[in-house]
Image: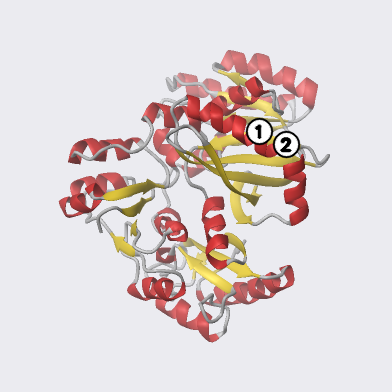
Amino acid sequence: MKNSRLFISEFESEKRLRSSSSFSLPSLSLFKKRNDLLLHGMDGLTISMAEKGDILVTRIPLKDVYLHWWKETFCEVGNISPNSSPSDDNETSIYHLLQKDEATHEILKNSIIRNYAVTKEYYDMCNSIGMAVTEPDLAIVTMLNQKSWSNELRNRLGYAPRGITVSSVEAFDACIHKMLNTYGNVLVKDSMGVSGRGILPVDSHKAAERLSLHFRKQTEEEKQIFDFVIEPYLNCTMDFSCQLHIDRDGSTIIDGYQKNTGIGFGYYSSEILRRDETDLILSSGYPACVMNIGEEMAKTGYFGYACIDSMITDEDTVIPLLEINPRMSMGRFNLSLHQKTGKNCRLSYLEGTASGHGSVEKMLEDLERIRILYTKDHPYGVIPLAPNTWDTAKCSATDRIRVYYAIAYEKEGDYEKLLDSWLKYCAWNICSGTIR
C-alpha cells in the first residue's frame, strides 16, 4: 500500500474557499442547502483516473459488486471510508472526517495524495496528523480560483473578452451602464461563484438597477468583500476546455482537450472533440495561449492539475481563457476514460426523481442483460460512475437524485442507440420526471 495514490474529493471547492462576508448574486441564494444526494456520492467519480493499486476515499463505502466489475473491466482499485459520528453534519468536510478517524492516518501518511480540489480543510488535516503538505499554498489556490484573477491575466495577455473587475457597489454602478451601452448584453460573474451558478446575464439598464439594489441590501447585512467581473456577453457555438498539469519545475503539459455542454451556465457533459473542431483550435494558436497561461500560473507558485475553460464564438473566433479551475475536472475524468477504453467517450449525468427501488447490484445485472454495459467482452456501452448515487432504495418519492455515467462508442450513430436504451432503462429503474 505504501506509495499508492490516494484520491480524495471535495466538490464545490469554491464554496469552501469563499468568504462568508462576500457579496453574492441572486442566483446563489437558491443553492444555500447542500444536497446530499447530488454531492455525497460524487466522490466516486475519481475512479475514472485510477490505475491498478490506487485507492479512492469515499464518504460511503463503494459496493463490492461495483469494485469487482471495475476490476474485471479496467483494474483493481481500493476503497476506504472514514468513520463519522452523529455530530458530523452534512457540511463536514471529508478531510475533517479523515482527520478524526485515526485508523486512516497511516494510509494517508504512506500514500501519494491526489486531491480533486484543494480546500482549507486539507491543510488542517495535514497539520493535525503531522502529514507533509504536497499542494501549493492555500493563498495561491484561492487566488487562482478567482475569476477576477483570470480576468486580470486575460487583460494582461491581451486575450478577449476584456472584462472589468469591480470591487465596490459604486464601481459596479459606474461600470455596468457603460458596458451595456457598448455591448448591449453583459455577464456579471461572482469571482468565487460555484459551478457556473455565480454568473448572471444582464441585458438592460433596469436589470442592472435591480442587481445594484440587491447588492445594496447586502451592504446593510454588513457584507464586506465585493469582487465581481463584468464582461461582454459572447455568442457561443462551442464551449471547450484544456486539461493540463503544471510540474513542480514550472513546466506546463497539455494533457488533452474536451468539448463541454452546459445547462445555462452550469456543467452538463464532456466529450472528445471532432477532428474539424480540434483543427480549428490548433490552427488558432490556442496551444501557445495555454502555455502562456500555464507559465503565468507557475510564476505564482502553483503546480498540479488544472482546467482552462474556453469557447468558440459564432464567428469561429477562439476565446482562449474564460476562467481557470486549479483542480481536476469532469473533462479530465472523461479524458481518462477515453484513454482507458480507446473509444470515444461522453460523460454526463441524469437528474430526476428517485424511483425508490434502484441499486448498484440490480443496475449492473440489468445493463449486462440488455447488453449496454461496458465490459471487456463488450467494449462499448454505459460506464456507470459515482455508484453511491445509484442506490435509491432509501430515497423518498420526492427526492431528486443525480446519476453520473459515461458512454463509450465508435460512431455517433452508435452513441445515439446506446443513449436511447440507457434513458429508457433509467426512466423505469433509476429516476423519473425531469431527465436531462
Q: Is residue 216 above or below residue 262?
A: above
Q: Image height check: is 271 above or below 11?
A: below
Relative to 16, does residue 393 appear above or below in the rendering? Answer: below
Query: What crowding class fits label 1: few (fewer than 14 Cα within 10 Å), some (14-19), or many (20 or more)?
Result: some
Query: Mark 1: which secondary structure?
Result: helix
- The residue at the point 51 percent across, 82 percent down is 368
264 vs 340, left or right, is right
**Residue pictured at 39% horizontal, 26% vertical:** 139
The amino acid on which the numbered mark 2 sits, given as a three-letter code, is Gly
Does the residue at mark 1 contact the one at mark 2 (Cβ under 8 Å)? yes
- Give the image quarter of residue 204: top right
Residue 134: mark: none
For residue 13, what is the image quadrant? top left
SS at mark 2 in the image: loop
Front-most of 202 and 293? Answer: 293
Which residue is under mark 2?
285
Q: How many marks?
A: 2
| Quarter of the C terminus within the rendering | bottom right
Q: Residue 427 or 277: which is nearer the viewer?
A: 277
Say what amino acid the circle numbered 1 marks.
Cys
Q: CA distance from mark 1 to mark 2?
A: 7 Å
Crowding at mark 2 (Cα within 10 Å: few <14, some 14-19, many 20+): few
Residue 9 placement (x, y as % from top left): 39, 50
368, 92: nearer the viewer: 368
Q: Nearer the viewer, residue 264 or 222?
A: 264
Q: Residue 242: x, y in percent?
A: 60, 44
Q: Which residue is mark 1?
A: 289
